[in-house]
Image (cartoon, rainbow, N blue to C red):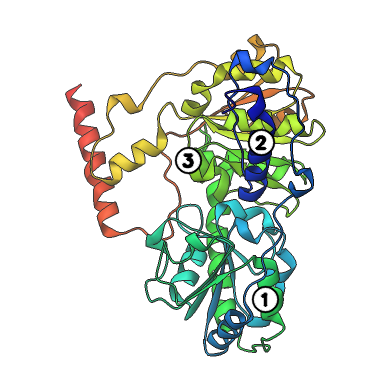
C-alpha cells in the first residue's frame, strides 16, 4: 500500500521486483487522495528489475542424482509447470533413460498429446498409465512440480525432486535427494553424466497402458454412443479437435475441469491456463477475458460449468463492450457436479441445494449482443462447435450434457464403489417418497 506520495517510488520497485521474483501478480493499493499526488523522485534501481534467471544446481547434487539413476531399474519422470522451457531436455532425458513422462495439469501443454513418451496426467486429471508409472517405478524424478495430491505419490522415498523453490522440496512425499535448481540447467548437467539405457520394457508397458486408456477415452467421447443426450466428454473432445492449433484453453474449476483436461488432445503449441493452485470456481470467464485482452488475434476458448459461469455471468458484457472474441463453452448439467461426486462418493445422497435451474445461456449471449449457440443433439454437436468457434466475436455455446455422467478414474477403490451405490439407492428412495 502507498500511504503517501513519497512512498510510491520504493513501493513500485518492490512490487515489480516481487512480480518478477515470484513469477506472479503483485497488487498495489493506492488510496484516492494519494493517487492524484505528485511524486518528486523516480523509481530507483530500474536496471535491477528483470525476470528471474535460471538457477544452476550444485555439481555434487548432480553427481548424486546420476548415481541414483544409474542404480535404478525403472525410472519415471513427473513434470510440472517448473519444467516449462525445458521441453527438449525432457524428451532427451526420456529417450536416454527409456523413461515415461507424466505431467501435472499445469504442464499438460508442454508437449503434444501425440508424443509417444508423453504418457498423460496423474490423479483424477490423468489416467491409469500415468498413475501406475509413478507408483511402480523404482525411482521417480519430480521435475518442477509441487504436486499436492499425495495419495498418488510413492511413499518409498526413492524420489529425486528438482525445484527452484527449496521450500517445496520434500513437503509432499518422502524424497531421497532434493536438488535446488531450475529444471533446464539441471537436466543439461545430468545428461552430460548419464549413459544410454537399453531396456525399454517399462516404457513400452506404460505406452501400452496409455493406448488402452486412450481407446476408452475415445469411446466415451463418441457422440454416437447415446441418442438424444450429449455426454460432456463429447463436448470437450469436439472443442479440442476444432480449436486453433495455437489456441489458449481456459478451464474453470469443478467437474468441468475433469472433462476439459482428460479429453483435450493438446497440440504442443496451445497454452492451458486456469485457477490451478487456488482452485477457485467462477474464475474461468475472467481469465479468458484477460487472456484475450493480451492477444486479440489468438483464439481463446474457455470450458466453464453452469454454476461457475452464473457466478460471474455479468462479466460477459465486458467481452461484448471491448469486442473481445472469447469463446465460452458452458456445460449445463444443472448441478454442482463435483459436489455431487464428493457426496455420493461418501455414501450420501445429493441434497437439493447441490442442484439448480439454469437460464438459456445462448439466449443470454444474444441479449448481450453476442452470438449464442445451443448443443443438445449429439448428431449435430460437431457442426455446432465448428460454427461456434468460427463466429467472429464473443460467443457462448450452451452445451446441455448428461448430468449423471461419471468421470474416468484410474482405479476405483472398493469403498468408493460402495459409497456411490449406497448414495444412488438413497436417492432412488428419496424420489419414491416424493
Front-lying residue, 58 or 236: 58
**In this rendering, would 4 be left or right of 431?**
right
Q: Helix or strand or loop: what does disc 3 sit on?
A: loop
At which x and y percent is residue 286?
61, 28
Q: Residue furthest left?
A: 433
Q: Residues within 10 Å of mark 1 (few under 14, many from 20)?
A: many
Residue 82's place in the image compared with 101, above or below, is above
Q: Which residue is mark 1?
A: 93
At which x and y percent is residue 333?
45, 30
Q: Which residue is mark 3?
A: 279
Residue 10: give its label.
Answer: 2
At which x and y percent is residue 144?
58, 62
Q: Helix or strand or loop: what does disc 1 sit on?
A: helix
Front-lying residue, 46 or 314: 46
Q: Helix or strand or loop: what does disc 2 sit on?
A: helix
Q: Nearer the viewer, mark 1 or mark 2?
A: 2
Query: Residue at the spot x=57%, y=89% of the render?
Result: 70
Amino acid at each position: 500500500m502507498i500511504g503517501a506520495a513519497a512512498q510510491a517510488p520504493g513501493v513500485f520497485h518492490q512490487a515489480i521486483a516481487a512480480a518478477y521474483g515470484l513469477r506472479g501478480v503483485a497488487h498495489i493499493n493506492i488510496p484516492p487522495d494519494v493517487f492524484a499526488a505528485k511524486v518528486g523522485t523516480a523509481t530507483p534501481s530500474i536496471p535491477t528489475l528483470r525476470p528471474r534467471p535460471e538457477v544452476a544446481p550444485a555439481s555434487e547434487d548432480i553427481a548424486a542424482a546420476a548415481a541414483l539413476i544409474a542404480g535404478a531399474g525403472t525410472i519415471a519422470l513427473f513434470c510440472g509447470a517448473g519444467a516449462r522451457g525445458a521441453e527438449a531436455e525432457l524428451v532427451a532425458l526420456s529417450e536416454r533413460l527409456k523413461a515415461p513422462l507424466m505431467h501435472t495439469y499445469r504442464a499438460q501443454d508442454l508437449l503434444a498429446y501425440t508424443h509417444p513418451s508423453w504418457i498423460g496426467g496423474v490423479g483424477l486429471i490423468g489416467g491409469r498409465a500415468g498413475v501406475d508409472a509413478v507408483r511402480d517405478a523404482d525411482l521417480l524424478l519430480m521435475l518442477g512440480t509441487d504436486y499436492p495430491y499425495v495419495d498418488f505419490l510413492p511413499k518409498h522415498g526413492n524420489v529425486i525432486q528438482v525445484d527452484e523453490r527449496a521450500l517445496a522440496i520434500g513437503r509432499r512425499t518422502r524424497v531421497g535427494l532434493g536438488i535446488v535448481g531450475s529444471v533446464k540447467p539441471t537436466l543439461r548437467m545430468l545428461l552430460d553424466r548419464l549413459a544410454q539405457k537399453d531396456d525399454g520394457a517399462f516404457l513400452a508397458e506404460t505406452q501400452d497402458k496409455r493406448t488402452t486408456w486412450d481407446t476408452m477415452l475415445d469411446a466415451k467421447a463418441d457422440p454416437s454412443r447415446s441418442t438424444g443426450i450429449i455426454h460432456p466428454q463429447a463436448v470437450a473432445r469436439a472443442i479440442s479437435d476444432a480449436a486453433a492449433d495455437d489456441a489458449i484453453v481456459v478451464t474453470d474449476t469443478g467437474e468441468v475441469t475433469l472433462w476439459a483436461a482428460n479429453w483435450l488432445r493438446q497440440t504442443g503449441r496451445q497454452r492451458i491456463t486456469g485457477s490451478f493452485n487456488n482452485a477457485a470456481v467462477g474464475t474461468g470467464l475472467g481469465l479468458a477475458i484477460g487472456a484475450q485482452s493480451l492477444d486479440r488475434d489468438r483464439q481463446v476458448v474457455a470450458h466453464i460449468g453452469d454454476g461457475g459461469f452464473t457466478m460471474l455471468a455479468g462479466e460477459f458484457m465486458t467481452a461484448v463492450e471491448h469486442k473481445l472474441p472469447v469463446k465460452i463453452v458452458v456445460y449445463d448439467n444443472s448441478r454442482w457436479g463435483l459436489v455431487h461426486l464428493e457426496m455420493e462418493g461418501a455414501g450420501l445422497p445429493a441434497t437439493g441445494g447441490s442442484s439448480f435451474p439454469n437460464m438459456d445461456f445462448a439466449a443470454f449471449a444474444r441479449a448481450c449482443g453476442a452470438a449464442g449457440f445451443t448443443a443438445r443433439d449429439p448428431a449435430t454437436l460437431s457442426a455446432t462447435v465448428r460454427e461456434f468457434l468460427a463466429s467472429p466475436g464473443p460467443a457462448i455455446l450452451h452445451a446441455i450434457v448428461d448430468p449423471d455422467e461419471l468421470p474416468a478414474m484410474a482405479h476405483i477403490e472398493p469403498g468408493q464403489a460402495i459409497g456411490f451405490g449406497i448414495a444412488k439407492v438413497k436417492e432412488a428412495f428419496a424420489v419414491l417418497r416424493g
